[in-house]
Image: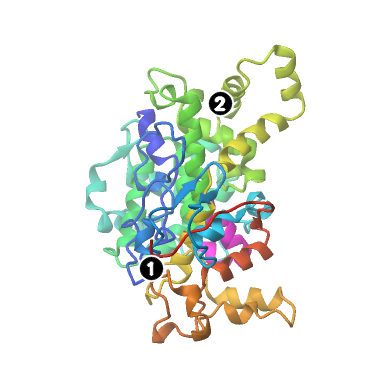
Amino acid sequence: MEARDEAKNALPPPLAPPIGNNMNGDTSMMSNIQKPTFDRQPSAPPMDSFGSSMSTTASSTLPINSSLSTTASSGTTTLPSDQKIDSFSISYLASKHSFGPTAFSPLHTTAITSNGNSYVDLSKSISDIVLSSMPAARDMKGERDRKPVTRMLTDIYQRGLFMHGNANSSVNQTIIPAFRHVVAELNKMDSKYKKRVDMIQHLVEACQDCQQVQARVILRMYSDLTCKTQTLEQQLKYSLVRPKEAALQILISKYHAPDCDQSHNIIGPERQRAHLLSAYVSLIGDEFGLDGVETAKGDRFLNEALAVVRSVHLHGYISSISSSMLSNGDSSLKQSIMDELTSSLCVKEWLTDLIGDINNQSPNADRVIDRACIFSWATKNTSLNDDLPHRIFYEDSRTEEYKDLDPSRPTKDNEYEPLFSPNVLVELLVKMQLLKEITGLNVGVYVVGK
């Protein structure tokens, strides 16, 4: 299997639509995905839709003034200095804030068990579930073209991933219940439902890749399906995972391309993208707020891939410095990598995405953030004198705050659901320490509509 094909699956697919989809009702899962934009973007391998950011075209959700420019390296927005301030716009608010400490902390997701879905053995139905949604899978094979993908998926359902040990190994004790949950959810959906078709397509494609990619795809699907059962803070932290992973893929390209995308016949597995990704995730996953850390640590080529990462990033240092950096538990190396990744994340894009997800007025929107828990969090985490719990809802007296949004007011069916203005969303994120205000910054000014 080509390593480039591994790269296509290195970032698993989103199951919910990308945050920031058209708030007027477009719930198509893949319709609005675009790749993240960075000031310095080395050429990255083709990653298809699931290698891109959750961001969507800003104009589909928020008409941001076209004269504004985003500086991704600082996560802030540059505003023209000769125009009037619009303090309610996302661009202005993003220019005043950077990511806070909570944005870079462990996800602390709930342990994966089979208890959430009352277990019904669907192993004999997997072939039908797959082929009814993707008939072409009948002729598709994996494991170097030796085994039908339907057989592979059945084996994963029953015994886990054989490269990660038996069914009782630490990785498979996570993979097996996660995949059984995914299959149970697929079985509930109509066979032609786009979300089910997309999920099955990604599972089938993963079967044509290495087992490390298969593990990531399965765990990502499980996380996407269960994200809304987490706390509001955990949901918001999870919404940053894909932008972080997109930044990590670009970093891998910067330091390891083009070798990392060569065929396994040309380079060793420790230099291939899928296993390099495991090395980086095992190094910084917890501190940086990535998921899939345990799976990365179970990569059978992890030690060799870690050696490659250390060699590349420590290249040029004298041996004594390199030894020192390694002896302190890679802390200097990890901090260097996290600093570079953090500089590639954009506050403005994240705020736009969150507004698009939460304010989506479609009754069938497939959301990342559960609106039902927003009011509950706000009431439990504010004082009696704080009116934040009321301001998460639309008010006619605050129309100025919504003027750049589309929609700028809720539909009748959603009048009792949260509708965030940018400044109220930022206030909530600051309380959670997901954002922090940049002090002593001369932001500049601009006029709306120019």
Using the image as rendered, state which of residue 411 and residue 162 is in the foreground.
411
Using the image as rendered, state which of residue 37 and residue 67 is in the foreground.
67
Residue at position x 53%, y 59% from top? 92
Q: Residues within 10 Å of mark 2 (few under 14, many from 20)?
A: many
Which residue is denoted by mark 1 in the rendering? 188
> Measured along the vertical axis of the image, is residue 182 above or below residue 322?
below
Q: Which residues are magenta?
A: 226-241
Rendered image quadrant of residue 58 = bottom left
Q: Is residue 61 magenta?
A: no
Q: Of tags 2 and 1, which is closer to the observer?
A: 2
Which image quarter is the N terminus in?
top left
Q: Is residue 146 left or right of residue 237?
A: left
Is the stretch drawn in magenta largely helix, strand or loop? helix
Can residue 317 be seen by looking at this rendering?
yes
Percent position of residue 177, x then y: 53, 55
Residue 276: which numbered mark, if any? none
As drawn, the residue found furthest toward the front would be 82
Using the image as rendered, state which of residue 276 and residue 251 is in the foreground.
251
**Picture mark count:** 2
- Element type at mark 2: helix
Residue at position x 62%, y 42% from top? 285
Percent position of residue 300, x then y: 55, 30
Which residue is denoted by mark 2 in the rendering? 305
C-alpha span from label 2 to label 1: 40 Å
Percent position of residue 242, x then y: 49, 49
